[in-house]
Amino acid sequence: MARKDSAATKEPGRIKQMWQVFQMTRRYDPRAQWYMLGTLLLGAVIGVVLALTLTGGNVFSVVLWIVAGVLLGALGAIIVLGRRAERAAYSQIEGQPGAVGAVLRSSLKRTWRGSEMPVAVNGRTRDAVYRAVGRGGIVLIGEGPATRTRKMVEDEKRKIARIVPNVAITVFSVGPDSDAVPLHRLAGRMAKIKTSLTKPEVLAVDNRLNSLGTQMPIPKGVDPMKARPQRAR
C-alpha cells in the first residue's frame, strides 16, 4: 500500500509538466501556440535550406541538417513557451497586492537581492513599496497608482540616502498608470540598469539596509529603561 501511495503522490514527469504548462499558457494566451508553431517551422525551414545549399546532394547530410533544423525549432518553441508562460502567470496576479513581491522572489537574476516583503505598506489602500539591491544600485518599486505611492517612495528614498549615500537609486512604478512598468517586464527593466556597484558592495549595501530595517520603533513617550512592571492584582 505504501508503494502505491508513493506512486500516486509522485510528481508528474517532465513531458507531462510541459504539457500542463502549455495548456495553462494557451488558456490565458491563445497566441502562444502560434508563436511556438512559427518558431518550430522556422527552424525546420532553416534546416532544409542549409541541407540544400551545403550538402552537395549527399542524402545522409541532408537528413542530418533537416533533423538539426527541427531540433533547433523545437528548442526555440520551448524557449517561447517559457517566456509566454511566465507572462501568462504574471497576468493572473497583475494588479493584486503582493504581485511585485512575487517577481522579486522568483524572477530576479542572481546579481539582484530582493525580498517578497515590502519595505512600506499603506494599510488602508494596500499600496506598497518594495526594495531590491544589485549591481545597478538600489531599486524602489511602487505597487499601486503613482499618485498614492509617490510619498511612500520619496520617504524611502530619503531614508536610504541617509543610510547609504552615494548609491544610485532607481524608481519604478507598477500599477494602473499608462506609464507604469508592466509586471512581466519588471525583471527585464531592472536587468538593463547600468552597473554601478561591485558584488561585495551589493552585499554590504544590502546587509546595511536589512540590519537597520529590522529595528522596531519604540512608541513616543515610552522609555523602556523606566517602564515599571504591572503589579499582580
Image: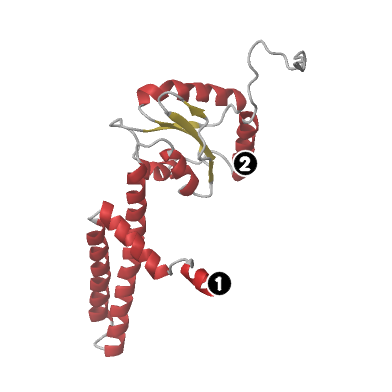
- Mark 1 or mark 2, which is nearer to you? 1
Q: Tell me the kind of residue under disc 2.
A: Leu
Read off the residue under disc 1: 2
Q: Secondary structure at mark 2?
A: helix
Read off the residue under disc 2: 203
Q: Is residue 84 left or right of residue 37?
A: right
Q: How many marks?
A: 2
Q: CA distance from mark 1 to mark 2?
A: 47 Å
Q: Secondary structure at mark 1?
A: helix
Instruction: Name the quadrant containing residue 127.
Output: top left
Reading the chain from its start, which is encountered first: label 1 or label 2? Answer: 1
Q: Tell me the kind of residue under disc 1.
A: Ala
Q: Is residue 85 left or right of residue 109?
A: left
Q: Which percent across, then down, holds residue 216?
A: 64, 25
Determine the residue positioned at 32% across, 50% down: 88
Using the rendered image of the protein, determine whether residue 138 is visible from the camera's viewpoint. Answer: no
Q: Quadrant of the image for the C terminus?
A: top right
Q: Is residue 37 left or right of residue 146?
A: left
87 shown above or below 37: above
Determine the residue positioned at 65% across, 27% down: 215
Q: Which residue appears farthest toward the top when viewing the image?
A: 221
Determine the residue positioned at 29% across, 74% down: 70
Q: Which percent across, then down, holds residue 6?
A: 52, 69
Q: Which percent across, then down, holds residue 89?
A: 36, 49
